[in-house]
Image: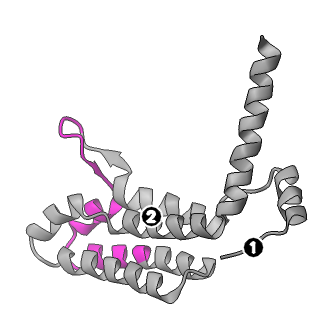
């Protein structure tokens, strides 16, 4: 876990630049596109390109495998530990393998959102690594809000 000195922490909070890294933000956007981009009317299930393109036998599933592997690569670029990368890879391979089962694979794809699962792994890990800075930022925002409320009175 990264330790931040009080000065480093104060500087980053003053800069107002503390946010999730670009790789995590890209992974979130890609996972949403692949798994939940469109809400199906009347049944309330969200689907994405993974489901829609996956309806095309072999080519669709292979194309979506490549897109899903991009999320795993983004996790690697963040410095995600190897066991978490392996879990993400396993989720991706399960999703890919299920896609080859005619009809059943397409139905399972509605509910097994491997890309979102992988992004959640990345998010949890990043939050653990930056907990001290996130807590300090939340405390700063709370104090700003309290001051704003006091000035309204």
Q: Position of residue 45 (x, y in %)?
A: 24, 46
Q: Is residue 42 magenta-colored? A: yes
Secondary element under disc 1, as helix, strand or loop, is loop
Q: Nearer the viewer, mark 2 or mark 1?
A: 1
Quarter holding the C terminus? top right
Q: Position of residue 42 (x, y in %)?
A: 19, 35
- Name the foreground residue: 56 vs 29: 29
> Is 66 displayed left or right of 51 in the figure?
right
- Name the foreground residue: 36 vs 6: 6
Q: Is residue 20 magenta-colored? A: no
> Is 55 displayed left or right of 129 in the figure?
left
> Is 87 displayed left or right of 6 in the figure?
left
Mark 2 and mark 1 lie on one chain; the one further toward the N terminus is 1
Secondary element under disc 2, as helix, strand or loop, is helix
Kindly identify which residue carries mark 1: 3
Q: Give the total number of marks visible in the rendering.
A: 2
- The residue at the point 43 percent across, 56 percent down is 32
- The residue at the point 54 percent across, 76 percent down is 75
Kindly identify which residue carries mark 2: 120
The answer to whether 5 is drawn above or below residue 90 in the figure is: above
Q: Which residues are magenta?
A: 41-68
Q: Position of residue 150 (x, y in %)?
A: 79, 19
The part of the image, by quadrant, that contains residue 108 is bottom left
- The residue at the point 59 percent across, 63 percent down is 127
């Amino acid at each position: 876990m990264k330790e931040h000195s009080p000065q480093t922490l104060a500087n980053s909070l003053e800069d107002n630049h503390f946010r999730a890294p670009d790789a995590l933000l890209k992974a979130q956007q890609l996972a949403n596109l692949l798994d939940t981009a469109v809400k199906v009317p009347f049944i309330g299930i969200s689907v994405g390109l993974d489901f829609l393109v996956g309806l095309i036998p072999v080519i669709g599933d292979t194309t979506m495998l490549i897109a899903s592997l991009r999320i795993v690569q983004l996790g690697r670029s963040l410095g995600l530990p190897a066991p978490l990368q392996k879990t993400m890879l396993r989720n991706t391979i399960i999703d890919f393998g299920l896609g080859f089962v005619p009809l059943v694979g397409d139905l399972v794809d509605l509910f097994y959102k491997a890309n979102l699962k992988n992004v959640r792994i990345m998010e949890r890990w990043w939050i653990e690594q930056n907990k001290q800075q996130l807590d300090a930022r939340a405390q700063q925002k709370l104090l700003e809000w309290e001051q704003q409320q006091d000035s309204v009175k």
